[in-house]
Amino acid sequence: MLRDRSRPLPLGRRRVFRRGTGKGGAAGGGGHRRDGCGRLPRARATGAAVTGALFTPVRVGGVTFANRLVMAPMGTCLDQGGFVTDDTVAYYRRRAEGGVGAITVEGCLVSSGTVGPEPRLSGPEYVPGLRRVVEAVKPHGVTVGVQLMHPGRQVTEGPSVAPSPVPLNSVSPTPHELTVPEIDGIVADYARAARYAADAGFEYVEVHGAHGYLPSNFLSPRHNQRTDDYGGTLGNRARFSLEVARAIIGASGLPLVWRLNGTDTEPGGFDLDSAVAVARMLEDAGAAAISVSSGTWLTLQQTLAPMSVPRGHMRPLARAVKQAVSVPVMAVGRLDDPALAEDVVASGDADLVLLGRGLIAEPDWPNLVRAGRLDEVRPCIACNACVDLVGRGERAQCSVNPEAGRERTWQVKPAAVPRRVMVVGSGPAGMEAARIARVRGHRVSIWERDAALGGKLEVAGSAPSKREVLRYRDFQARRLEQLGVEIHTSAPVSPETVRGQQPDVVVVATGAVPLVPPIPGIDGPSVYDAQRLLLGEIPVAPDSRLVVVGGSATGCETAELMRAKGIEVTLVEMRGSVGRGIEAITRRQLVKQLERDGVALLTKAVVVGIEPGLVRWRPADGGEERALAADVVALAIGWRATGADVTAGLDLGDIEVRVPGDAASPADFVRAVNAGADAGLGI
Ligand SMILES: Cc1cc2nc3c(=O)[nH]c(=O)nc-3n(C[C@H](O)[C@H](O)[C@H](O)COP(=O)(O)O)c2cc1C
Ligand code: SF4
């Protein structure tokens, strides 16, 4: 069993300097990792090595995968105009270096009429670029395949096509209903793309037959309303998939992996019984493996489970398919817990485990797990920032791994001259700045006003749905300690502290403080910063009525935590919906949770005054003033950067100053961590 990392490290094991301890120990050498100036340290056994089932070879079609770990296909938006770039090549090379058995390169568009941000395999001109990916990956002993996709009606631009003219949702265009000759044309597109894949040197192809894309859309009894040979019975709805499968195998000779939904998780949608039957049909058609996923664009919280969803939620789907077919089966869904991944294979629920976001966060996951260095695996917190960025057509980045998406240029070079660096504030930006600066050889201290490292991570991790954030906080704290960063907690920094430290560089990573707008009564006795409720600093009696003002992430998290304690909660937001700034999938899940828990959501409501026992508000679009009963009021209205004030207050003179993250401009974790990394790289 892995140690529960959501609990803070025992203080005795930390290299901690409390207030008044002066400079503390010198920054000693730490066990540098790959980004520690290019050296991998000798293996340290910090956990049980997972070597049983996970690291045994397996045959898929005629090809041998070196182990049971497959990098899941994941769009990166690193391509340009459909052509892979040097950034794409570097991104996949980095994952191959980490010891994964196979890599399925992200979904590539097969039809020239389709528009999207994905790379393309719709013409021979795309082959040389993808061949470079293959050549970068294969020398590392990794089997490499590519996913072929046709988005159907799940597009944000360009033509939308589907088996039936059923729009995705009320704001989507009605898709064009494919004619039989058009269907034949798309089948031929898949076959041609598979030939290009073989030309590029790929060793297998995967069809994206899941997640509501075209083949999956055909399978759905809810969305496929055709009355011809491609609609109606399951056999008819599966016809398109089977034609594609046979055409690809015939044209390319490559082993075919079919990505299939175990369920669409939509009412009246494609379900597990149907999935099991279709898996058998695909096996009969010659598929070499079935990769089982679930969800569509309408149920993305299933496909891309946010951190509130328990790990392994799709495992039963893989198990059911595995029991029905004799070809290898792949499982997916937050399986980046080493013990869980091992168990999925060892138990026979699946033959292979897909690692998606876990490999964005930690490319070395396979090698570290194999060596038993579990403490060094940087945890993906399933925040979905990567998905959010890619969904908006921006390059993939990660909230915990600043190298992600910039592997080509990422270099953590030793500093020419080691300098004394003082990092003030230990939120996401401060900890990452300290880590990178220390890895580069600077002498680094980090100063936290509160009793534990973490800043905003500590606050966010208090909410039941965001506990995972604390795993990352603990990981970072452990890294800083191992690297020999001086850690000062309960240590506010004054001009005297800075003078005593004599730093060459001060990193002001003090984050942001809550905005307090001029609302009458806002300074009343029962009005608090919501963060204080999250941290448990303000006891709220269970029979209280709490009004949370502001439906931002902090507001929603406060409402969630307080409601879980039985408190009656109303969340008031001036905009039309709550969860502003939260990634869309996480937001959908959180809002559902709040509604299920009975949190009253009052939107388009402007708070105009606070008095003892009540909050006065007015509809945002005008109308009469009304009142809500409130024993306690929590404010989560917005943030103000602290960097400029803190810098001025510390009287830093001509000391070099860096102000990363929220201290410069309040944003989200992914920007804070990346800004912290940039600060550390720039010193
Ligand atoms: C940024 C991103 C892009 C993705 N793009 C694809 C894709 O192109 N094709 C696909 O089948 N799945 C795609 N997925 C889904 C993943 O393959 C995988 O099923 C999902 O991330 C769940 O696995 P995980 O919990 O290990 O991350 C994507 C996921 C992410 C995070
Ligand atoms: S951005 Fe978040 S979900 Fe994506 S890999 Fe990084 S930690 Fe995981």
Image: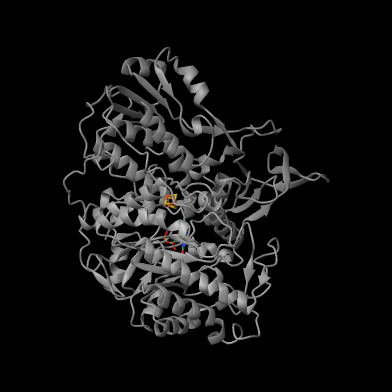
In the rendering, at what x and y percent does residue 262 appear?
Answer: 47, 75
- Viewer can see residue 448: no
Q: Is residue 28 left or right of residue 326?
A: left
Q: Nearer the viewer, residue 204 or 631?
A: 204
The outermost residue toward the right is 623
Looking at the image, residue 301 sits to the left or right of residue 104; the answer is right
Give the percent coordinates (x, y) of residue 231: 61, 83
Residue nearest the observer in this picture, 677 or 7: 677
Residue 140 vertical placement versus 611 (above, below): below
Q: Residue furthest top?
A: 653
Front in this rendered view, residue 641 or 622: 641
Q: Is residue 433 above or below residue 253?
A: above
Task: Write the residue at 62% across / 71% down.
Answer: 162
Between 144 and 505, the one nearer to me in the picture: 144
The x, y position of residue 338, in whole percent, is: 29, 60
Residue 306 in view (yes/no): yes
536 displayed left or right of 633: left
Image quadrant assignment for residue 409: top left
Task: Identify which residue is drawn at 59% across, 60% down.
Answer: 592
Residue 213 rendering spot, x and y as whole percentages: 55, 68
How many discs appear?
0
At 34% from the left and 79% from the top, the residue drawn is 327
Q: Is residue 511 left or right of residue 619?
A: left
Q: Quadrant of the C terminus?
A: top left
Q: Quadrant of the N terminus?
A: bottom left
